[in-house]
């Protein structure tokens, strides 16, 4: 008799999971139509199939198991892609902004939570959950807008890396507040410190002596490499959980142990789809456990905390970046990326519930804040330029009279130039090398300090700044420039540059770079006198076209070009 019962139970669970996935797909399509992250759709799926809806996902162990594996893979990928060098590449602004926003949000979030009537430990959890922003959502939105390589995009990704490091520390610290361990908080903190130190040392040893030769052998078979990565992530998470440590931190350190190897990108790219699929079950499980009656009671506090995140977080970023000499536009666009809470916030809330430090009411509150802030901030980021147009007047309060980090940081830029070269990546640097023998005065512009240092080492006068900011473009020495060349293969970036040149009255030639053939006509309609296609026009050919434009303009009367 037990065998048929087991078969029937398995069959029922399989059918329910299949139906849940179908519902998640339908709701996901609706979310995409509304330009919302799938995370929102998955939480709504959990509500639909949970006890408050169809009753299919009533706290089953299957969902929780898949959810735990998903979190382990997520933390593993975060550790795997941890790029501390990115923080250095954007300078101290990523560290200062990241830490400043964390301290501001945690402190005032804690005070606000106390004012709303929450106990101190619960207020700490809520404050920490308000602190972190979603790296996955922000990188996706910036990539879709082709802003991931803009100045504000690079800075945003930089301080999101700082947040990723901080969230791991928060998981360790919040775990130490449990009252279930012998020895109280101090004893638990000492035990966690010892276990954490052992894990870190083990990770360092593994990273240095074990992983390089092991992965070199496994890399001969890509399927085996991926299987090992998942096993390593889940195995370290289980080991950490077995010694009463945080399994999330165990999975994270597993990723860190591979991050320095040559195989991290290959592993990360193959795990991304698996991570997203497994996280679906975490958010469905979270939504299914959402107590709608408790959530209704928490709607007022959720709205208060949501306004705090949507307004307070961006403002502190704008203020810090303004004090550091950045333009209000750069600070505002970067600040919008922290106007929501993270999937890590929901993971921390689930951790608090598991440790008995949070109740269903607080988890419902944090989930509501997550849904509200993620939904609204998505539209804020998508409409960031229009929002900035409305708010650029009041935002002057956060900009120095001389925003030196973007305007005054000219390393060796000349006053009189023939060519202004916007973008010093591979294509831009190659064009400069082809133009160099022609004895032209050239000024290079980029926001990447490493690219600027490399170009300056080759003798190119450079200036730090964001070419996509029309105000910055208008500040360039356009009165003497004959040709402005953009090597940025982004229609939006080139439109912004063209707008800045028109505002400044530039009458010379604007040469843009197209992403593909379809963009050529659009760029010419915008007013580009010539377009370059990196895949068709080699740097040598591009330099010939630029010289042809220069010679043509030089043969005309002097008043026919330059700034009017």
Image: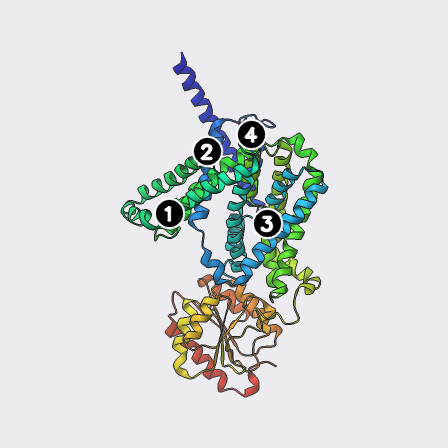
Other-residue count near label 2 (Cα within 10 Å), few / some / many at <14 / 14–19 / ≥20: some
Mark 4 → mark 3, Cα distance in angstroms: 25 Å
Q: Which residue is at 71% across, 40% downward?
A: 116
Mark 1 lies on a secondary structure that is helix
Measure the alpha-carbon separation of dots 1 and 2. Answer: 20 Å
Question: Callout 4: 10 Å neighbours few (<14), some, many (20+)?
Answer: many
First in sequence, mark 3 or 2: give its number.
Answer: 2
Q: CA distance from mark 1 to mark 4?
A: 33 Å
Q: Separation of disc 3 and disc 2 at Cα?
A: 27 Å
Q: Which mark is residue 492?
A: none
- Residue 3, x across and y down, in percent: 39, 15
Estimate the x, y position of residue 293 in percent, counting from the top left. Answer: 67, 30
Residue assigned mark 4: 49
Cα separation, mark 3 vs mark 1, equals 29 Å
Please state the horizontal and vertical placement of residue 149, each as a whole percent of the image.
Answer: 49, 60
The residue at the far top in this view is 1
> Dot 1 surroundings within 10 Å: few (below 14), some, or many (20 or more)?
many
Instruction: Calculate the distance from the C-alpha at mark 2 to the C-alpha at mark 4.
Output: 16 Å
Characterize the local packing of mark 3: few (<14), some (14-19) or many (20 or more) Cα atoms within 10 angstroms: many
Q: Secondary structure at mark 4?
A: helix
Could you say which is closer to the camera, residue 486 or residue 87? Answer: 87
Q: Is residue 379 above or below residue 235?
A: below
Q: Please identify, in this view, whether the residue under mark 1 or under mark 4 is nearer the observer.
A: 1
Which dot marks residue 66?
2
Task: Indicate which label's residue lies in the foreground, 3 or 1.
Answer: 1
Residue placed under numbered mark 1 in the picture: 267
Residue 378's mark? 3
Q: Are marks 3 and 2 in contact (CB under 8 Å)?
A: no
């Amino acid at each position: 008799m037990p065998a048929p019962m087991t078969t029937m139970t398995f069959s029922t669970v399989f059918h329910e999971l299949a139906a849940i996935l179908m519902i998640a797909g339908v709701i996901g399509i609706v979310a995409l139509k509304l330009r919302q992250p799938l995370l929102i759709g998955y939480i709504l799926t959990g509500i639909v199939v949970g006890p408050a809806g169809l009753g299919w996902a009533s706290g089953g162990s299957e969902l929780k198991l898949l959810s735990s594996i998903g979190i382990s893979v997520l933390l593993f990928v975060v550790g795997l892609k941890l790029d501390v060098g990115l923080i250095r590449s954007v300078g101290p602004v990523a560290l200062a902004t990241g830490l400043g926003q964390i301290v501001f949000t945690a402190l005032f979030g804690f005070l606000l939570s106390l004012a709303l009537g929450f106990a101190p430990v619960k207020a700490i959890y809520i404050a920490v959950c308000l602190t972190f922003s979603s790296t996955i959502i922000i990188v996706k939105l910036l990539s879709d807008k082709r802003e991931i390589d803009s100045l504000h995009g690079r800075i945003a990704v930089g301080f999101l890396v700082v947040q990723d490091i901080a969230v791991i520390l928060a998981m360790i610290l919040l775990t130490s507040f449990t009252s279930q361990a012998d020895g109280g908080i101090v004893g638990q903190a000492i035990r966690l410190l010892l276990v954490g130190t052992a894990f870190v040392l083990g990770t360092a040893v593994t990273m240095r002596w074990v992983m390089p030769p092991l992965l070199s052998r496994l890399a001969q078979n890509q399927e085996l490499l991926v299987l090992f990565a998942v096993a390593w992530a889940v195995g370290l998470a289980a080991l950490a959980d077995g010694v009463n440590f945080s399994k999330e931190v165990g999975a994270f350190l597993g990723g860190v142990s591979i991050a320095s190897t040559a195989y991290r990108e290959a592993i990360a790219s193959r795990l991304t789809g698996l991570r997203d699929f497994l996280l679906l079950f975490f958010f469905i499980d979270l939504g299914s456990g959402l107590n709608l009656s408790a959530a209704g009671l928490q709607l007022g506090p959720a709205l208060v905390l949501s306004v705090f995140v949507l307004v307070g977080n961006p403002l502190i970023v704008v203020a810090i970046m303004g004090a550091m000499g950045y333009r209000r536009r750069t600070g505002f666009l970067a600040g919008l990326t922290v106007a929501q809470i993270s999937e890590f916030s929901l993971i921390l809330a689930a951790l608090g519930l598991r440790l008995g430090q949070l109740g269903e009411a607080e988890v419902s509150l944090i989930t509501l804040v997550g849904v509200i802030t993620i939904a609204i901030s998505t539209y804020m980021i998508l409409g960031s330029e229009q929002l900035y147009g409305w708010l650029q007047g009041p935002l002057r309060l956060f900009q120095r009279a001389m925003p030196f980090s973007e305007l005054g940081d000219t390393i060796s830029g000349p006053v009189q130039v023939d060519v202004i070269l916007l973008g010093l990546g591979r294509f831009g640097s190659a064009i400069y090398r082809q133009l160099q023998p022609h004895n032209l005065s050239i000024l290079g512009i980029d926001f990447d300090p490493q690219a600027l240092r490399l170009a300056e080492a080759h003798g190119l006068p450079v200036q730090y700044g964001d070419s996509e900011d029309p105000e910055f473009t208008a500040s360039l020495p356009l009165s003497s420039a004959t040709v402005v060349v953009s090597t940025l293969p982004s229609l939006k970036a080139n439109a912004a540059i063209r707008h800045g040149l028109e505002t400044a009255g530039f009458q010379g030639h604007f040469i843009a770079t197209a992403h593909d053939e379809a963009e050529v006509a659009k760029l010419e309609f915008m007013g580009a006198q010539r377009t370059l296609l990196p895949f068709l026009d080699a740097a040598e050919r591009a330099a010939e076209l630029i010289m042809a434009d220069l010679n043509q303009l030089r043969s005309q009367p002097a008043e026919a070009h330059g700034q009017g």
